[in-house]
Image (cartoon, grey):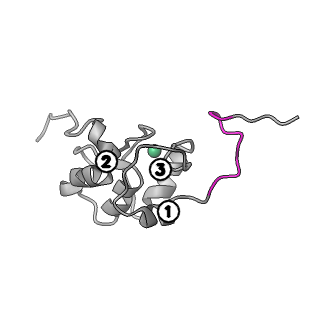
Amino acid sequence: EIGQLKPRYAMDDRFHREDERLKTFENWPLDFVDRNELACSGMFFMGESDKTKCYFCEVEIGRWEREDQPVPEHYRWSPNCPLLRRRTTNNVPINAEQLERLLPPPSYDICGANDIEVRR
Ligand SMILES: [Zn+2]
């Protein structure tokens, strides 16, 4: 509907559950970006255009292109996302093994902006 700018889905406490995130993708417009991978890696569909948002780091990603992969894009825009960085979160995955396959390898970078560890 023209003029409707309010996203259909905003941040919701239920979205720590992957099955609840997946439900928001019912009308996901892009065949070439896998909704299961998006939901698995923390994203929900905002219901507007092709905007997605991560429940865990609140990054918003839209304007997906054909070659984009959900996890590398998410990591590029939000390298400190607690889900992607394998921190303890309240995420409830549908399939923990799928999540494990999707996540980037454990990072050796301990000097990120949010967790500085200095050794002397
Ligand atoms: Zn995130």
Ligand 1: give its quadrant: top left
Answer with mark 2 or mark 3, whichever residue precedes in sequence: 2
Q: Is residue 95 above or below residue 62?
A: below
In this view, the mark in front (2 or 3): 2
Q: Which quadrant of the structure image shows residue 46?
A: top left
Q: Position of residue 77 (x, y in %)?
A: 51, 44
Left or right: 91 with respect to 115?
left
Question: Mark 3 belongs to which amino acid?
Answer: His
Answer with mark 3 or mark 1, whichever residue precedes in sequence: 3
Check disc 1: other Cα within 10 Å, few if <14, some if 14-19, many if 20+.
some
Q: CA distance from mark 1 to mark 2?
A: 19 Å
Q: Position of residue 22 (x, y in %)?
A: 27, 55
Q: Which residue is mark 2?
A: 44
Q: Which residue is mark 3?
A: 74
In this view of the protein, which residue sits in the foreground, 33 or 119?
119
Q: Which residue is mark 1?
A: 100
Question: Mark 2 belongs to which amino acid?
Answer: Phe
Q: Is mark 3 within 8 Å of ligand 1?
A: yes
Left or right: 72 with respect to 112?
left
Residue 114 belongs to magenta span: yes
Residue 58 belongs to magenta span: no
Q: CA distance from mark 3 to mark 1?
A: 15 Å
Q: Is residue 70 above or below residue 1?
A: below
Answer with mark 1 or mark 2, whichever residue precedes in sequence: 2
